[in-house]
Image (cartoon, helix red, strand yellow):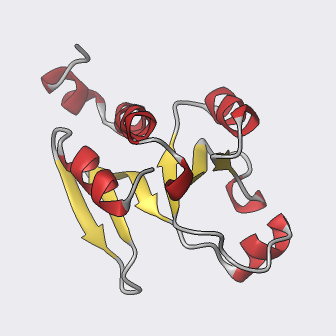
């Protein structure tokens, strides 16, 4: 299963990506200043909304192309989920320790394409 090292390797392999750490130590990856994947520790409110006593493991946030893609991923199986905090937002949460590395690679790449601005996409078109 995937680790933060896998996320870092996959994200930084994409064009024009920068890694940032927050004051709390959470890491995020951006393309042209736009967030596409990030470490997302669950907040007390998230845990309450999910009915969980504690965070079950590392959680990755990832942008997706649209709400339809988000709904499909969340409905697929127990790897992807969301919280009310992300209602109406084209982002999904991922149990990092439950996702296969190849699937993570697809997710990170799709997240990059979902947020990369047109000028970046012109310089780096899909193969």
Counting from the top left corner in percent of width and height, residue 9 is at: 22, 51
- x 28%, y 60%: residue: 5
Quarter of the image containing the C terminus? top left
* Viewer-closest of 103 and 65: 103
Counting from the top left corner in percent of width and height, residue 83 is at: 74, 58
Counting from the top left corner in percent of width and height, residue 33 is at: 28, 54
2 relative to 56 in the view: left or right: left
- x 56%, y 51%: residue: 98
Q: Quadrant of residue 27?
A: bottom left
61 relative to 47 in the view: left or right: left
* Viewer-closest of 112 and 55: 55
Extreme bottom residue here? Answer: 23
Counting from the top left corner in percent of width and height, residue 34 is at: 35, 50
Above-or-below relation of 30 to 66: below
Above-or-below relation of 70 to 59: above
Q: How many marks?
A: 0
Extreme top residue here? Answer: 127
23 relative to 53 in the view: left or right: left
- x 50%, y 56%: residue: 96
Q: Quadrant of residue 111?
A: top left
- x 62%, y 29%: residue: 69
């Amino acid at each position: 299963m995937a680790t933060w090292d896998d996320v870092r390797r996959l994200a930084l392999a994409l064009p024009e990506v920068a890694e940032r750490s927050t004051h709390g130590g959470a890491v995020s990856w951006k393309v042209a200043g736009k967030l596409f994947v990030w470490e997302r520790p669950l907040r007390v409110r998230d845990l309450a909304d999910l009915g969980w006593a504690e965070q079950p493991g590392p959680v990755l946030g990832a942008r997706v192309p649209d709400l339809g893609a988000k709904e499909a991923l969340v409905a697929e199986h127990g790897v992807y989920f969301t919280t009310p905090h992300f209602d109406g937002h084209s982002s999904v949460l991922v149990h990092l320790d439950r996702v296969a590395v190849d699937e993570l690679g697809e997710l990170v790449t799709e997240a990059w394409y979902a947020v990369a601005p047109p000028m970046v996409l012109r310089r780096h078109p899909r193969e």
